[in-house]
Amino acid sequence: MKAGPAPRTLRGGLARAALAASALWIAVATVAFNALLGSQLRTQADDVLHARAEAVLGTVEVRPDGLRVHDPADDAALDTGVWILAGDRAVEEPGAGGELDAAARALAARATAPRTEDHGAHRLHAVPVPDPCGHRAGTVVAALSTSPYRTIADTALAGSAALALLLLAGIHLLTRRMVRRALRPVADMAAQAAAWSGSDLTRRFGAAPRPRELAALAGHLDALLDRLAALVRHEQRLSNELSHELRTPLARIAAETEWLRGGPRAPADLARTHEAIARDAATMREICRTLLADARPGTTPPPAATAVRPAVEALAADLRRTRPHPAVTVTCAPAAADRAVAAPAPLVRRILCPLLDNARRHARDRITITVETDGDRGVRVAVADDGDGPPTGIAGIEEAVFAPGFRAEPDDGHDGAGLGLALSRRLARQAGGDVVCVCGAGGGRFEVILPGCGPPPGAAGPPMAWGAKTAARVRSGPRW
């Protein structure tokens, strides 16, 4: 047997459930009421029959020559539907004749004790008349029409059924109205959340006084809006970072292409230009792979080891090739010459490139890159320039420069979006390190601290990620 169609709305489902439960209880109550009424009517009819038979029995006297009936004052009331029989002879009878008379005589013949039977629309009750010796001298049979009682029972059944239907209709309408009123705040909250998700993701329902269920729903919707806002911020950050990082190599490719279109070029110049375009295209591919891999939820950089000194020198060479001024100097401490960091080479380059670009923009004549050890296994790469450095008049400038979109001097003519330093720190923290700003060094100075891999020189045992000293230097905080 197939189930009925599911309700299209929660309101309809709740109304149907309430209607079904109410119908069950009302049906039980209606059946119980009519059964009880029928029992009471049957008992009342029997009482009337018994009282009539006993009253007639009190007027019957047993004599040696037969039964004698003493007529009472209200003889008409007692003679209605009453038979007094002595064997087959009727001492008194109502003169009804027909089937009812035959049924009364048959009952009298069988009634050795008080007995009640139904016959059609009548109920008969027979009581034996004892003689002085205790033998049955005759029988009194009383009859009562059950039509009035059946009419009452039928009327009560029809009335109770009509009342049950009216109750069900009222319950259904009232339930739908109450459910609609109860669910209206839910629909309003859902519509409000949908509107906020499309226009203003900063809005929340908060902790305003609400019923417990609505407060729980508001909390769940706020959490959902938080996750949606985080997802939108993540997408916006990824698009901003990609555009920020791709802008420089794309501009170089556009410049080289424009130069090629300017007229015939020498073979050596063509080869150099093609090499530059290929190099910038590879840089763009690396940027996309690195940032997209970092943006995937739940991903961590794959296990890798990158020699720091060659990576830093390659970046410095690229910077000298594209911008001869300012001068770039790389200094590597002897203890850090062979150090490697536990991060892929593309990720190391993406961490250092924004710092180098920031130093190139603010330096007057010189950029210094210093590679040093940090603790037993860590590596610190410092990028310093001889510019003015971060403004000292801003409180907490050491952290403010890493805020996405921060510009210490918005009118300095630079068309950047203020995302490079934030990206560098976020990628460093993703690799287990950090980027810090050092003020008061006579210019701008940013230090990258990355976990090293492999044991320190002269140490035995398995490789370790980095030492306790490096771990103490890395600041905990949210990812940008």
Image (tube, rainbow, N blue to C red):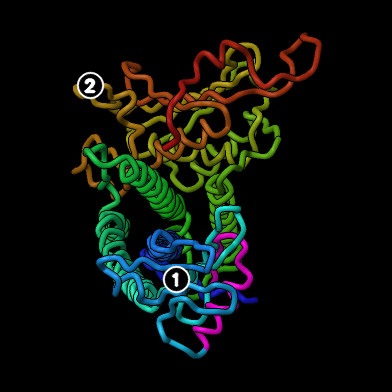
Q: From the viewer's perspective, tell me whether residue 478 is left or right of residue 317.
A: left
Residue 141 locus on image (x, y percent): 49, 71
Q: Nearer the viewer, residue 65 or 356?
A: 65
Question: Which amino acid is tagged 1?
Answer: Ala
Residue linked to disc 1: 142
- 356 vs 57: above or below: above
Mark 1 lies on a secondary structure that is strand
The local crowd at label 1, few if under 14, some if 14 to 19, many if 20 or more residues have their Cα within 10 Å, is many
| Magenta residues, start to end | 99-117
92 inside magenta stretch: no
**Which label was assigned to residue 395?**
2
Residue 421 locus on image (x, y percent): 40, 36
- 327 vs 416: above or below: above
The residue shown at (40%, 41%) is 420
- Picture quarter containing residue 392? top left
Marks 2, 1: nearer the viewer: 1
Image quarter (top left, top right, bottom left or bottom right) of the N terminus: bottom right
Question: Which amino acid is tagged 2?
Answer: Ala
Magenta span: predominant SS is: helix
The residue shown at (36%, 42%) is 216
